[in-house]
């Protein structure tokens, strides 16, 4: 195997053969060459970064058995899935782990890729062709995340209603979620952060609900354990929440004991029921979540589809070693302290067209909301201590549980790691705004929210992939740290080349449109505040217009 650099047509690497190979393909994402053996249904892989080799057979419990070798292979570039034709089936292989995981019947023996639609084309000897979808149907992978985000927002509002007697806080946190660009982008990008975020918020909701249960506190605690188990199965960040529940239980138990009320601290008191509650909490927040986590990897228990022949224990070790040693620099990396200020969001997508338009998807949080939320979180912490408010203390605690855990981690970090803390961060903002609202400063709250809505409208193309002229890209880079070369794979870097000069006319148009939306939002907020006054003001305005017209005539 010889690797040729095409600019000068010189050989850069050479790999000795281990078997006679029939077909070859290259996966850009992991920088891996995949070879199909000529004498058996097996694949060899070579990582071009470090030369590491692996071999896997096509046959397993999901793909079936094979009597003949692979005749053709192709990689769909934007999915990094490899397709290999053997025995009348197109076998789907995850090249990141060299794991064959599905087989699709086809009469084709040759493969090609429709780059426009990311569709696999299998050509049969008769001249007929099968078109096989490769998972690039946007609705299929965007819709579940949007549903999860909608449920997250709904449960966050319910949590606000459970925590506070104020009717304003649930409304304010709902508006904040809708107007935040990070919430908008993360819900539509197909990553698992929105799912773990949903389960974390829902888990805390049922823990809070257990303190004033409608039916059974124990049922609420069990439901919370199941939800956090689902969260852990989605992403390890939910284990931070489980650690937070342990800390909360110890604090509640110690407080009740110090107040000469041992066992009377509520559903999280470890001494309740003469210590039996400790066993129940261990079942709810240790046994059940761990059981759900393990069940989600059921096929990995010595399963034939595991990459490199790993079992679950080895897979877990590899996941931990990967994340603990992920220290290579990345253009989108950002330190933990920068996240509350949105100093460096992450590119999810960059597209460039022939007519000069670019499309961006940037998980940029709404800076108006984020910067206000930082002040509000500090205020919540101070107010919780001064007023001994358990509700405000919980909000700050929930933020810190998902945030502080990232501080000691040495791996390369990104802004989206803040997403699981974001719902509670916005809830803290809602608490701060509610204080202003209920202390008679409603005009300031309306003005602030109107500006936040206007900011969302201004940055909407930047978080949604809406095409804009490339010459106008500079209008979105409000901070110098926001502009950097986006990199999706080690070998795929997309230079943005955003102009350094602001397009004044384009900025003025966008600001004008955003200001118009802000005015409409302010009118809507005023109408919600006092529908009668808003209607009277509208009638008065119409009346003045009619009289003015009569006088003119």
Image (cartoon, helix red, strand yellow):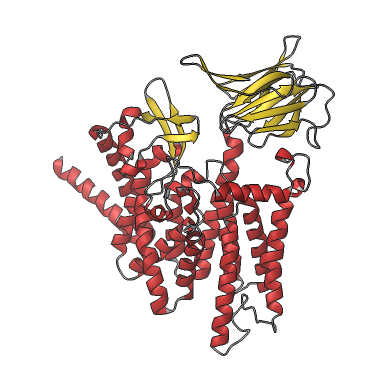
Could you tell me which quadrant the C terminus lies in? Answer: top left
- Considering only vertical position in the picture, is 211 above or below 83? below
Q: Locate residue 524, reporting x and y percent.
A: 36, 53
Could you tell me which quadrant the N terminus lies in? Answer: top right
Q: Identify the residue shown where x is 30% and y is 52%.
A: 538
Q: Nearer the viewer, residue 118 or 511?
A: 118
Left or right of 406 on screen, residue 34 = right
Left or right of 122 on screen, residue 61 = right
Left or right of 509 on screen, residue 411 = right
Q: Locate residue 528, reporting x and y percent.
A: 39, 58
- Considering only vertical position in the picture, is 158 above or below 539? below
How many tags in the picture? 0
Residue sticking out furthest to the left:
552
Q: Nearer the viewer, residue 220 or 400?
A: 400
Left or right of 397 on screen, residue 549 = left
Image quarter of residue 388 = bottom left
Q: Nearer the viewer, residue 388 or 238?
A: 238
Q: Locate residue 67, reporting x and y percent.
A: 85, 24
Image quarter of residue 124 = top right
Does the rendering let one see residue 523? no
Q: Identify the residue shown where x is 60% and y is 70%.
A: 246
Image quarter of residue 355 = top left
Residue sticking out furthest to the top:
126
Q: Identify the residue shown where x is 65% and y is 73%.
A: 217
Does the rendering let one see residue 517? yes
Q: Locate residue 292, reporting x and y percent.
A: 71, 56
- Considering only vertical position in the picture, is 23 above or below 382? above
């Amino acid at each position: 195997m010889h690797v040729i650099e095409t600019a000068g047509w010189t050989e850069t690497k050479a790999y000795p053969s281990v078997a006679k190979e029939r077909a070859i393909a290259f996966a850009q994402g992991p920088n891996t060459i995949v070879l199909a053996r000529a004498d058996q249904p097996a694949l060899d892989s070579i990582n071009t970064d470090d030369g590491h080799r692996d071999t896997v057979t096509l046959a397993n419990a999901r793909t079936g058995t094979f009597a003949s070798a692979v005749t053709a292979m192709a990689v769909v570039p934007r999915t990094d899935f490899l397709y290999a034709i053997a025995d009348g089936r197109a076998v789907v292989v995850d090249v990141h782990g060299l794991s064959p995981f599905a087989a699709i019947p086809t009469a084709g023996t040759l493969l090609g890729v429709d780059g426009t639609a990311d569709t696999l084309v299998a050509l049969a000897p008769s001249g007929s062709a099968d078109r096989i979808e490769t998972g690039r149907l946007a609705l299929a992978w965007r819709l579940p995340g949007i549903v999860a985000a909608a449920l997250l927002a709904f449960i966050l509002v319910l949590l606000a209603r459970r925590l506070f007697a104020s009717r304003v806080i649930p409304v304010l946190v709902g508006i904040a979620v809708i107007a935040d660009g990070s919430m908008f982008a993360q819900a539509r990008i197909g990553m698992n952060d929105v799912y773990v975020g949903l389960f974390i918020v829902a888990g805390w909701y049922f823990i809070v609900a257990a303190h004033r249960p409608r039916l059974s506190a124990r049922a609420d605690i069990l439901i919370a354990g199941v939800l956090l188990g689902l969260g852990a199965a989605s992403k390890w960040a939910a284990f931070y929440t489980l650690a937070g529940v342990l800390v909360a239980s110890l604090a509640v138990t110690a407080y009740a004991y110090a107040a000469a009320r041992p066992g009377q601290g509520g559903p999280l008191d470890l001494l309740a029921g003469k210590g039996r509650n400790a066993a129940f909490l261990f079942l709810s927040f240790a046994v059940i979540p761990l059981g759900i986590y393990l069940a989600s990897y059921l096929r990995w228990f010595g399963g034939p589809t595991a990459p490199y022949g790993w079992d679950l224990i080895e897979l877990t070790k590899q996941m931990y070693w990967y994340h603990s040693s992920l220290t290579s620099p990345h253009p989108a990396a950002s330190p933990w302290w920068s996240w509350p200020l949105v100093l460096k969001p992450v590119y999810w997508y960059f597209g460039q067209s022939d007519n000069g338009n670019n499309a961006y998807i940037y998980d940029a949080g709404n800076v108006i909301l984020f910067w206000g939320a930082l002040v509000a979180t500090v205020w919540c912490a101070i107010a919780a201590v001064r007023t001994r408010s358990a509700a405000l203390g919980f909000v700050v605690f929930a933020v810190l549980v998902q945030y502080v855990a990232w501080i000691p981690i040495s791996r390369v970090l990104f802004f989206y790691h803040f997403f699981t803390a974001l719902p509670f961060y916005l809830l803290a903002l809602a608490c701060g705004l509610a204080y202003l609202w209920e202390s008679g400063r409603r005009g300031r709250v309306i003005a602030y929210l109107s500006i936040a809505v206007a900011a969302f409208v201004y940055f909407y193309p930047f978080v949604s992939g809406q095409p804009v002229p490339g010459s106008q890209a500079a209008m979105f880079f409000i901070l110098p740290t926001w502009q950097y070369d986006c990199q999706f794979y080690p070998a795929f870097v997309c230079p943005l080349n955003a102009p350094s000069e602001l397009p004044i006319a384009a900025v003025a148009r966008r600001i004008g449109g955003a200001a118009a939306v802000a005015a409409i939002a302010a009118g809507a907020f005023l109408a919600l505040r006092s529908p009668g006054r808003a209607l009277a003001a509208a009638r008065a305005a119409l009346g003045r217009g009619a009289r003015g017209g009569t006088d003119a005539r």
